[in-house]
């Protein structure tokens, strides 16, 4: 018969075991992790990278891939969060990757027409910024059991020759490296929304011929390439949703006028994505700024994305990386993105805006951005180099819209009638090799080389 002391001990042990289970979205593993690894019922510990795993809904019970949620804030940005976000316990995670913020009094403000190069300083943030896990580590088991795309990286410095056109306009570089999409086959050519929807369900190579109108939001599959044919392929009144998938390529397509409140391209819990030579536009800075949502949004622990040689124009809120200040438990350690050789014009804000993640942005052109440009928030690490800004308010800013500042480094950029506000110097240095075209001629280059109709 159990003694009273023994029974109490068993009950205490049982209660402790239950209470010790990790709450939804919180950290449950990773290199050096010494905390609990068992998630509460209905959730499983999902590997995000070598250093970080967190509790996500089990594949059987998860409905996040089917949620049709509006994105984050209505930018100004005033800080409203995703209205249908799971707020059960999505709070700042008290873990080894917690963000630390320094005083906002160390603000660097400049306004000039000269090239600006800022030195490096080591921030107090302990976010892992530049280490690429293998594809098996980066892809959650609940999303995919194996990945065909296996990126590699090497420690190197950019090859900037000082002449325009040094960088290849037909090569995948950056955090999205290793993405292979649907492979190299001839694939299927589609000319209607019905044909397109049927084709993407099967994946592979899909070629879009002409403009497809009114397709609504189409969900993509893993291992898919969507390639526009010629100079007039694309979508109007439609959007693409990547949720819980991996290994996708989107190239040579125009996107215009997404369905009300939706994104033109929405990337959630997805890895290894390459968006290249696309054109994104809406109706300009008129009407309700929240009627359309984002052009290209990356959120909810998505990782390893490259956006290159695209034209973003005539829109209120262009591109968001990380949708909410309160989603650190899911986003910290993920959201690695490379944006290069992109042309941004007549965009109000989010070019892009990033929380928690790591952004390498280089060789891009910005013109006429009236509210804010590259916005580093909530401890994000940002490196901006070889980029030209003309008539851009807060071209690079780290103390706007969020509870905590981000980090940023400005290097070899040109600012014409543009200013920057950097409160915390960044420390990120890319480990992959890349070629940067200089800021002095980048706008001229991109006006003829970015967008659709350039590649085959």
Image: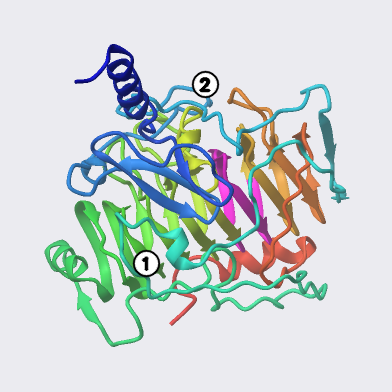
134 or 301, nearer to the observer: 134
Q: Is residue 386 visible?
A: yes
User: Splitting the image into 4 quarters, where does residue 254 fall?
Assistant: bottom left
179 sits left or right of 383 in the view:
left
- Say how the picture is coloured: rainbow
Q: Are marks 2 and 1 in contact (CB under 8 Å)?
A: no
Name which residue lies at 54% across and 62% down.
133
Furthest residue in direction top, as rendered? 4
x then y, percent, for residue 409: 77, 47
x then y, percent, for residue 56: 34, 42
399 sits left or right of 109 in the view:
left
Furthest residue in direction front, as rendered? 1
User: Splitting the image into 4 quarters, where does residue 88 fall?
Assistant: top left
The secondary element bearing badge 2 is classed as loop
366 drawn magenta? yes
Q: Is 138 situated above or below 371? A: below
60 sits left or right of 241 in the view:
left
Which quarter shows the N terminus? top left
Q: Is 172 situated above or below 363? A: below
Which quarter shows the C terminus? bottom left
Q: Residues within 10 Å of mark 2 (few under 14, many from 20)?
A: few
x then y, percent, for residue 31: 56, 52
User: Splitting the image into 4 quarters, where does residue 437 fall?
Assistant: bottom right
Magenta segment: 340-367
147 or 358, nearer to the observer: 147
360 drawn magenta? yes
Disc 2 to disc 1, how far (Cα)? 33 Å
Checking the image for residue 78, the label placed there is 2
Q: Which residue is mark 1?
A: 248
């Amino acid at each position: 018969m159990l003694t009273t002391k023994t029974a109490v001990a068993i009950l205490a042990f049982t209660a402790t075991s239950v209470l010790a289970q990790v709450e939804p979205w919180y950290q449950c593993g990773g290199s050096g992790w010494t905390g609990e690894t068992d998630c509460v019922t209905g959730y499983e510990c999902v590997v995000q990278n070598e250093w970080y795993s967190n509790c996500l809904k089990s594949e059987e019970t998860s409905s996040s891939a089917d949620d049709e949620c509006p994105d984050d804030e209505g930018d100004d940005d005033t800080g409203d969060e995703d209205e249908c976000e799971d707020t059960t316990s999505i709070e700042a995670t008290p873990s080894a990757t917690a963000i630390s913020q320094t005083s906002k009094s160390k603000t660097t403000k400049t306004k000039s027409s000269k090239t600006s190069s800022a030195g490096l300083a080591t921030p107090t943030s302990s976010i892992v910024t530049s280490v690429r896990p293998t594809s098996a580590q980066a892809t959650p088991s609940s999303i995919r059991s194996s990945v065909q795309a296996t990126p590699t990286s090497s420690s190197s410095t950019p090859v900037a020759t000082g002449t325009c056109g040094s960088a290849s306009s037909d090569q995948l570089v950056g955090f999205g490296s290793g993405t292979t999409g649907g492979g190299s086959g001839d694939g299927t050519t589609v000319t209607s929304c019905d044909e397109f929807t049927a084709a993407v369900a099967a994946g592979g190579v899909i070629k879009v011929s002409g403009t497809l109108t009114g397709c609504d939001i189409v969900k993509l599959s893993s291992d898919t390439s969507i390639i526009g044919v010629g100079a007039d392929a694309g979508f109007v009144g439609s959007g693409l949703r990547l949720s819980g998938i991996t290994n996708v390529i989107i190239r040579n397509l125009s996107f215009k006028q997404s369905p009300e409140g939706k994104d033109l391209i929405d990337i959630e819990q997805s890895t290894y994505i390459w968006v290249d030579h696309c054109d994104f536009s809406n109706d300009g800075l008129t009407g309700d700024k929240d009627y359309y949502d984002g052009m290209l949004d990356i959120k909810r622990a998505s990782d390893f994305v490259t956006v290159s040689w695209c034209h973003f124009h005539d829109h209120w809120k262009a591109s968001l990386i990380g949708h909410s200040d309160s989603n650190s438990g899911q986003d910290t350690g993920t959201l690695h993105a490379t944006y290069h050789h992109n042309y941004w014009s007549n965009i109000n804000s989010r070019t892009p805006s990033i929380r928690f993640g790591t952004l390498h942005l280089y060789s891009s052109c910005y013109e006429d951005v009236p509210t804010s440009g590259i916005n580093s928030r909530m401890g994000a690490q940002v490196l901006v180099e070889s980029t030209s800004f003309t008539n851009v308010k807060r071209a690079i800013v780290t103390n706007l819209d969020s509870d905590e500042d981000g980090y940023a480094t400005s290097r070899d950029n040109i600012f014409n009638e543009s200013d920057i506000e950097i409160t915390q110097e960044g420390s990120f240095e890319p480990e992959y090799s890349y070629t940067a075209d200089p800021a002095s001629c980048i706008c001229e280059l991109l006006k003829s080389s970015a967008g659709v109709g350039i590649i085959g």
